[in-house]
């Protein structure tokens, strides 16, 4: 598993608050991270947060992130945009801050992964219809071998979660459950 990275996307209190009960998801993600590390893999924590410069750089035509900039949402210094304490990064983990849906857009994550010899990604976190989908599509275009931790993703919209997980992603990524990951 040395060439594998588990991407934990947007596991931040402010994002997790959109779910009715994030506890079981956090438990599964913590177990997945422990298993990946124990097998020599990499864990990458990716969060969405903005500085003044980031808000200023958002084009007006970007409907989602222009609203984020206008309202000065997701400020980098806010504890609500930090990594959830139950998934605190370890010293060997990668840590990335992003300002778009995809963890690979406008960040150095791809460079950091390649430097570690990573060619396989297990994508997990929030939200299935946002960061998970965008990151998986970008990673597929970058020729990573992809897996989606199917019980390690969530979306505030259950119908969108099901559509993305079962209809859109399987053509690009192999779904894997936490039990399958632990057994591998």
Image (cartoon, rainbow, N blue to C red):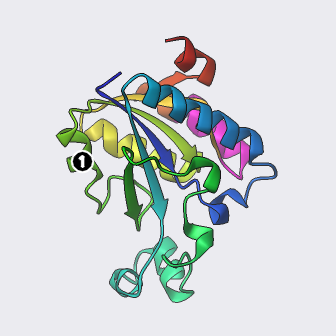
Residue appearing at x 57%, y 39% in the figure? 164
Q: Residue at x 75, y 39 (%)?
A: 24
Q: Judge by depth and name the residue closer to the eye, 82 or 19.
A: 82
Residue 111 image point, x, y percent: 20, 49
Q: Residue furthest top?
A: 183
The secondary element bearing badge 1 is classed as helix
Give the labeled residue for mark 1: 112
Q: Position of residue 74 (x, y in %)?
A: 55, 75
Q: Nearer the viewer, residue 184 or 19?
A: 184
Q: Position of residue 161 (x, y in %)?
A: 65, 42
Horizontal side, residue 155 vs residue 141: left or right: right
Residue 14: quarter of image: bottom right
Highlighted range, magenta: 155-168
Outermost residue to the front: 91
Is residue 156 one of those drawn in magenta? yes
Looking at this view, is 103 or 32 the one in front?
32
Classify residue 58 as left or right of residue 27. Answer: left
Q: Is 101 placed above or below 181 here?
A: below
Q: Is 144 covered by the magenta stretch?
A: no
Q: Residues within 10 Å of mark 1 (few under 14, many from 20)?
A: some
Q: Residue at x 66, y 62 (%)?
A: 13
Considering the whole magenta stretch, tell me its main secondary structure: helix
Residue 93 on image: x %, y %? 39, 45
């Amino acid at each position: 598993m040395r060439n594998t990275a588990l991407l934990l996307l947007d596991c931040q209190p402010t994002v997790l608050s959109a779910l009715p009960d994030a506890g079981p998801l956090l438990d599964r993600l913590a177990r997945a991270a422990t298993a990946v590390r124990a097998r020599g893999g990499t864990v990458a924590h990716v969060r969405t947060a903005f500085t003044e410069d980031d808000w200023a750089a958002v084009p007006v035509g970007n409907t989602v992130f222009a609203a984020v900039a206008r309202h000065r949402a997701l400020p980098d210094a806010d504890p609500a945009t930090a990594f959830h304490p139950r998934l605190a990064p370890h010293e060997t983990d990668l840590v990335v801050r992003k300002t778009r849906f995809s963890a690979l857009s406008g960040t150095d994550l791809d460079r950091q992964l390649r430097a570690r010899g990573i060619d396989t990604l297990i994508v997990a976190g929030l939200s299935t219809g946002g960061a998970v989908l965008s990151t998986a599509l970008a990673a597929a275009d970058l020729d990573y071998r992809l897996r989606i931790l199917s019980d390690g993703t969530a979306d505030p919209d259950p119908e969108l979660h099901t559509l993305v997980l079962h209809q859109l992603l399987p053509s690009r990524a192999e779904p894997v459950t936490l039990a399958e990951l632990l057994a591998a």
